[in-house]
Amino acid sequence: MKYDVLIIGSGAAGLTAALALAEHKKVLVLAKGGLNTGSTAWAQGGIAAVLDAGDTFDNHIHDTMRAGAGLNRQETVEFVIERAPRSIERLVELGVPFNQDGLDGKGGDLHLTREGGHSHRRIVHVNDATGWAVQEALLKAAEANPNITMLAGRACVDLITGRNAEDYSGSGRVWGAYALNQETGEVETYTATATILAAGGAGRVYQFSTAPRGATGDGIAMAWRAGARVSNMEMMQFHPTCLYNLEVKNFLITEAVRGEGGHLLHPETGHRFMADYDPERMELAPRDVVARAIDDQIKRYGLDYVHLDISHETPEFVTGHFPTIHEKLMGLGIDMTKGPIPVVPAQHYTCGGVLVGLDARTDLPGLWAAGEVTESGLHGANRLASNSLLECFVFGEAAARDILGRWDELLTPPDIKEWDESRVTDSDEEVVVKQNWTEIRRFMWNYVGIVRTTKRLERARNRIRMLTEEVEDYYGHFRVTTDLIELRNLLQAAELIVNSALERHESRGLHYTLDYPETADVARDTVLVP
Ligand code: FAD
Ligand code: SIN
């Protein structure tokens, strides 16, 4: 099947690019699982943009660089932040019902909430379920556009390059992707003149993560296998406040709870412990600082969790700001208007990824990338809260603009070989896949978590080597399934994270190692070359 542009991923980055391209081109969007099962739909807090009269671009740029511990690329930070207000305007035009100021919530100005690391109120939001509203509005616009075709239930296996052409070429030029039809089990060939990777992050490489089930690093792994460089993969962000509950393992409690006055407390003494770690910024220090403080409290006092408490505010204030979280917690027997919420840190965001420039181009001709799958230079060593949806809008648009601007130079795809299944059979050992999944996620949590050491990283690397042999052997012999595709990618992502972490001989932002506790004078990206 041939389209002008193939987009892998139907989240904020993919659909923003699709809508911008569809004014001129025929676009195909593929999604693994449903069209709304990526992280976008799960976003709670909101989107950062300078909209308040007392705020400036310089403030937002400064906060982003400070949170990113100087590893950000300033030109990217400026590029994104200066385009934020226009991105919000476009979402308003698409019908996203952002909360407004005023007693009735209809005051005319957008209501701005606050999150850690931000010096000003600058987060626009739809209650505490911003992502759901954004995903719905984007999907509605894409569905109504005759130039956009969206196919759910397509798990891309690998990018198609010149190596897959009938007339072989080793150029690495990307011409689309092979995708598993998750209903029929067949691998289909999708070719296009241009391909945009918008496949999200790799959070599920960790045992505890706020990310959805499909965040298995597929995009990063596919790009790496095709020959693209990836950068700063050691910078995995841990959100400080994931609900601690033995049944519900990945429910986020938005940072906006702290932004609106929530306190972090020792669960036994009630001590507001952030005073011991960052007395100036307290609960609103950047995420790496708060997550490390909680991790320290848990380890130091042998706790299972700490408390997040906003019950000192009125019930109307709490339920008015956080209706979704309040309802979810009530269903679990926790009333956040009357008492504290038990929380732990959990993996939340992949700051590293496929290296892109301001035009969203990757190293590979024919391949652009946007959103969490990328390392654009915006987040540096630690993403500032609510800057990631923003990155999706700005870079989704940048990819579309660059493709349209260069269209006349782009060639149409050559004939591509169909997926070859002649030498594989159906697996009779699905249990191996499941077992390996669990093993990776557990050792990544234990050895490559919030606080690292070289010894633990090396241990993880040895395990990854053994598992890679096993998984590649399995992949070579059996027909692909979604679980196998994800396991292979998860393992690839884990290897990239560990190798990057071993290359960084300092502690900076999210990468904290007991063997190199100091921060080097010069900030350098960890760029891995395939
Ligand atoms: P996603 O929205 O994750 O979409 C990925 C897409 O790729 C999906 O359609 C998926 O099906 C598809 N895909 C993946 N693999 C394949 C494959 N092999 N083949 C085909 N398709 C594939 N950020 C903020 O800025 N503000 C917030 O308030 C906020 N809250 C968050 C709350 C939670 C719980 C989480 C997990 C994240 C939050 N984030 C927030 C981060 C933000 O949601 C994500 O970074 C952002 O939505 C990523 O968008 P994306 O388009 O890059 O990817
Ligand atoms: C949150 O609501 O705390 C998540 C915000 C983000 O990840 O940017």
Image: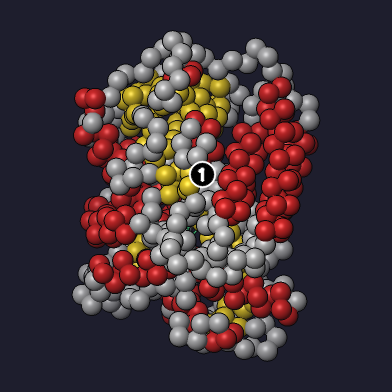
Task: Residue at 46%, 10% (x, y): give it.
Answer: 166
354 is higher (above) or lower (below) than 92: above
Quadrant where the N terminus lies?
Answer: top left
Could you tell me residue 92's position as x and y percent?
Answer: 26, 56
Left-right relation of 112 to 500: left
Residue 224 visible in the picture: yes
- Which residue of the protein is positioned furthest toward the front in this rendering? 521
- Which residue of the protein is positioned furthest toward the top in this rendering? 167
Could you say which is closer to the camera, residue 1 or residue 359?
359
Left-right relation of 37 to 54: right
Could you tell me residue 206's position as x and y percent?
Answer: 64, 53
Left-right relation of 424 to 400: right
Classify 10 Å Cα crowding around label 1: few (below 14), some (14-19), many (20 and above): some
Q: Would you say the beta carbon of the disc 1 residue lies within 8 angstroms of ligand 1?
A: no
Could you say which is closer to the camera, residue 188 or residue 316?
188
Quarter-wise, where is residue 221 in the image?
top right
Could you tell me residue 529's position as x and y percent?
Answer: 50, 40
Could you tell me residue 258's position as x and y percent?
Answer: 48, 77
Quarter-wise, where is residue 251 in the image?
bottom right
Task: Residue at 64%, 30% (x, y): give it.
Answer: 481
Task: Residue at 45%, 85% (x, y): give it.
Answer: 280
Could you say which is closer to the camera, residue 358 or residue 8?
358
Amino acid at circle 1: Leu
Task: Residue at 43%, 26% (x, y): give it.
Answer: 172
Picture colour scheme? secondary structure
442 is higher (above) or lower (below) than 164: below
Residue wearing tag 1? 528
How many numbered circles are shown?
Answer: 1
Dot 1 lies on which element? strand
Residue 39 visible in the picture: no
Left-right relation of 319 to 330: left
